[in-house]
């Protein structure tokens, strides 16, 4: 029986407990999950792609069925190259659904070999986004309950020690 592998793409700038919730729940469904850090030159990221990969790799080190990679270009092309057949997308609110639905439909138009699985974010993380985390951290607010300690330290270093 072939392994069932899914790709969970995103910018993860930075990774939050909401992201980890989706990863952990996806690992209960799939044999493997590739956490795919998108290379997007149009976004003004706080952390470099390599910093995000390093943080995710460290945070996920106790989850051997999860691996961290990076990609650029069409997601469905990357998913097929990675040997996966499913894209995982987390939804926080109805407002997320409309955009994600459009992306899923476009991906389905490009290839029927890749399915999209929408996972509702767990209630404690329904408001959480990387953007909110960066804003709160930048303003010296508490982010301890929003991100792993490694990410909090990295945020502190960026905002307290300068970029």
Image: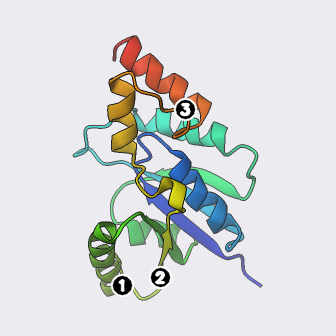
In this figure, which residue is indicated by the disc labeled 3?
144
Image location (x, y in percent) of residue 37? 46, 50
Q: Is residue 14 above or below residue 141?
A: below
Q: Is residue 46 visible?
A: no
Q: Quadrant of residue 3?
A: bottom right
Sort mark 1 into few (<14), some (14-19) or many (20+) by Cα contacts within 10 Å.
Answer: some
Q: Residue furthest top?
A: 161
How far is disc 2 from disc 3 in space, using C-alphas?
35 Å
Instruction: Tell me the residue at 64%/53% (across/down).
Output: 67
> Which of the two residues, 143 or 79, is positioned nearer the viewer here?
143
Q: Closer to the camera: disc 2 or disc 3?
A: 3
Q: Nearer the viewer, residue 81 or 34?
A: 34
Q: Residue at x 51, y 68 (%)?
A: 81
N-terminal of the pair, mark 2 or mark 3, is 2
**Viewer-closest of 5 and 89:** 89
**Residue picked out by circle 1:** 108
Residue 46 lies in what quarter of the image? top left
Image point 47% across, 81% down: which residue? 114
Establish if 101 lies above or below 55. below
Residue denoted by label 2: 115
- How many marks the image carries: the answer is 3
CB contact under 8 Å: marks 1 and 3: no
Picture disc at residue 149: none
Instruction: Specify whether 102 is left or right of 136.
Output: left
Q: Is residue 133 visible?
A: yes
Query: Where does residue 2 sit, x and y in percent of width and height?
Result: 72, 81
């Amino acid at each position: 029986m072939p392994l069932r592998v899914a790709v969970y793409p995103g910018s993860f700038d930075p990774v939050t407990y909401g992201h980890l919730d989706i990863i952990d729940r996806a690992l209960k469904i799939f044999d493997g999950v590739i956490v795919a850090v998108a290379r997007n030159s149009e976004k003004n990221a706080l952390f470099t792609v390599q910093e995000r990969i390093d943080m995710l790799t460290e945070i996920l080190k106790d989850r051997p069925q999860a691996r961290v990679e990076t990609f650029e270009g069409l997601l469905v092309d990357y998913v097929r190259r990675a040997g996966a057949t499913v894209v995982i997308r987390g939804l926080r609110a109805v407002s997320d659904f409309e955009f994600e639905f459009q992306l899923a439909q476009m991906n389905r138009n490009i290839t029927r070999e890749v399915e999209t699985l929408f996972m509702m974010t767990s209630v404690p993380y329904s408001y959480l986004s990387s953007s909110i985390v960066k804003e709160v951290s930048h303003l010296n607010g508490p982010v301890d309950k929003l991100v792993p300690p490694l990410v909090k330290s990295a945020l502190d270093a960026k905002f307290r020690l300068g970029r």
